[in-house]
Structures are given as C-alpha cells and as structure tokens.
Image (cartoon, rainbow, N blue to C red):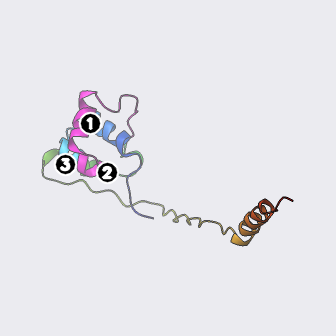
Amino acid sequence: MANTLLMPKATAVWLVDNTALSFDQIAQFCKLHPLEVKAIADGEAAQGIKGLDPVMTGQLSRDEIAKGEADAEHRLKLSEPKVRVPESKRRTPRYTPLSSARTARTRFCGWSRITRN
C-alpha cells in the first residue's frame, strides 16, 4: 500500500495548533495548498475538524518536528509504518449477459409488430 498520510486536514489542524512549523511545511507534508493551511490557522476552514496527532499515530516523529521548527526549509518526511497493510483488491464490474437483454428487447419489438386486421 502506498505510504500516505491518514486524515490530512485533521493532521494539519493539529500541526497548526501545536507546532511552530511554517504554513509551507505543513502544506507540503499534508499535501494541501498553503492558503488552505492559512485558512485553518485563521479559523476560516476546518472549524469542525478535531486535530489528529501524527506523533501518536506514528506518522511523524518528534525529532522530525523539531528539525522542521529549527529550519524553515526542512521538508517533513512521513515515518515508515510499523505494520504493512495489504492493498485491497479492486472489484471489477460484474458481467451482464447481453443475450438476455437482447431477447427481452426483441420480444417486445416482435409483439409490437402484430398487425391489425
């Protein structure tokens, strides 16, 4: 499975509230636009979203946050997951036999062709 961030907006809310990271760093880590992160900080966006601690979920380390706070150019890196979740198999569309649909259509068409005396 791809190594992706769980609940990016909730993580951005937590990072804005609990760290001194720049908006650009949070936006890059959460894959959001920097203006969206600024709106989260201003309280205009994500008002009902409760923050999700990425350190507690194991997606980010405290050392990585400290490096980001010290250097504004540092890009946060997602931690390697401790458990690998297998990728779910995508369900393919089910086959619908066309013959039954055709026979129903031709039966209907055949009946409508009955001529009147």
Q: Residue at x 37, y 61 (%)?
A: 80
Q: Is residue 18 left or right of residue 84?
A: left
Q: Which of label 2 and label 3 is nearer to you? A: 3
Q: Which mark is residue 61?
A: 2
Q: Residue furthest front?
A: 117
Q: Which residues are magenta?
A: 27-52
Observer-nearest of 79 and 7: 7
Observer-nearest of 111 and 52: 111
Residue 51: percent from left, percent from top: 37, 36
Which numbered disc flags the more N-terminal residue, 2 or 3?
2
Q: Tell me the element at label 3.
A: helix
The CA distance from mark 1 to mark 2 is: 16 Å
Quarter-of-image position of residue 11:
top left
Q: How many residues crowd around disc 1 within 10 Å: few (fewer than 14), some, or many (20 or more)? A: many
**Mark 1: amino acid:** Val
Residue 63: percent from left, percent from top: 25, 51
Residue 41: percent from left, percent from top: 24, 32
Task: Answer above or below: position of 67 versus 113.
Answer: above
Q: Assess whether mark 3 and mark 2 are in contact (beta carbons under 8 angstroms).
A: no
Residue position marked by numbered label 1 in the rendering: 16
Q: Is residue 28 magenta?
A: yes
Q: Residue at x 68, y 67 (%)?
A: 96
